[in-house]
Amino acid sequence: MHTEANSIGSLRSSGSTQPATGAARTNPEAKAPYPFAIGAAVLVVEDNEVNQLVAVSMLTKLGYRSHVVASGGEAIEALSEDDFAAVLMDCQMPGMDGYDATREIRRREGNRRRIPVIAMTAGAMNGDRERCLSAGMDDYITKPVRTEELGKVLQRWSGRLPARSRP
């Protein structure tokens, strides 16, 4: 189950033992550093509450709306219910990890539009990037992520964002 909330500070349980946070409201009058981001929603798949809050805060600063889920299974459910411009995927989560979730996302997409899946992981070892890409992820950034770095990665994939996610 994913949630959408009106402030970063609002946390609520998603019915599981994992916390889930929702989106921070995008101020349409704010001048976002990435104008294509205004109004676009990014799915954040992250089981750690602090990392959820950090990701939502960064996305808000960049002009994105965000939806947060705490597991790979919840990500698949959210993608079947809503349209997102991109997915930020943690790789190491209990249950269905980010690798398996991405493989399942790709399987379900079939010939439809390929949603950009960006690994957001603490793994910086040799082979981690390749493992993410071989699972079907499109890009890879390591934690701790800087807002500027996240903006550049999302901008790199902006040409692949669906038209209805752009202003």
Image (cartoon, grey):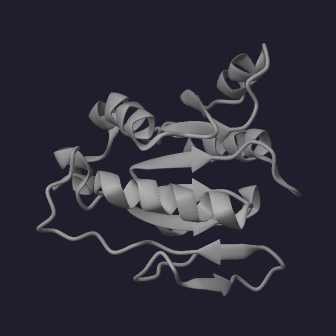
Q: Measuring from the top left, give residue 105's x and y in whole percent.
A: 63, 46
Q: Is residue 103 left or right of residue 158?
A: right
Q: Is residue 161 left or right of residue 134?
A: left
Name the one closer to the observer, 143 or 95.
Answer: 143
Q: Quadrant of residue 159?
A: top left
Q: Look at the picture and state if 73 lies above or below 89.
A: below
Residue drawn where x is 81% and y is 52% of the image: 93
Name the one closer to the observer, 32 or 130.
Answer: 32
Check the picture and name the quadrant holding the N terminus: bottom right
Check the picture and name the quadrant holding the C terminus: bottom left
- Farthest residue, direction right: 95
Work out whether residue 24 can be spotted: yes
Name the one closer to the observer, 67 or 100.
Answer: 67
Q: Is residue 23 left or right of residue 143?
A: left
Residue drawn where x is 23% and y is 44% of the image: 34
Work out whether residue 78 can be spotted: no
Q: Look at the picture and state if 142 lies above or below 74.
A: above
Residue drawn where x is 44% and y is 39% of the image: 150
Q: Quadrant of residue 156?
A: top left
- Farthest residue, direction top: 126
Q: Look at the picture and state if 120 lies above or below 74.
A: above
Q: Measuring from the top left, give residue 13's x and y in whole percent.
A: 71, 85
Q: How many marks?
A: 0
Q: Measuring from the top left, give residue 134's x and y in whole percent.
A: 71, 22
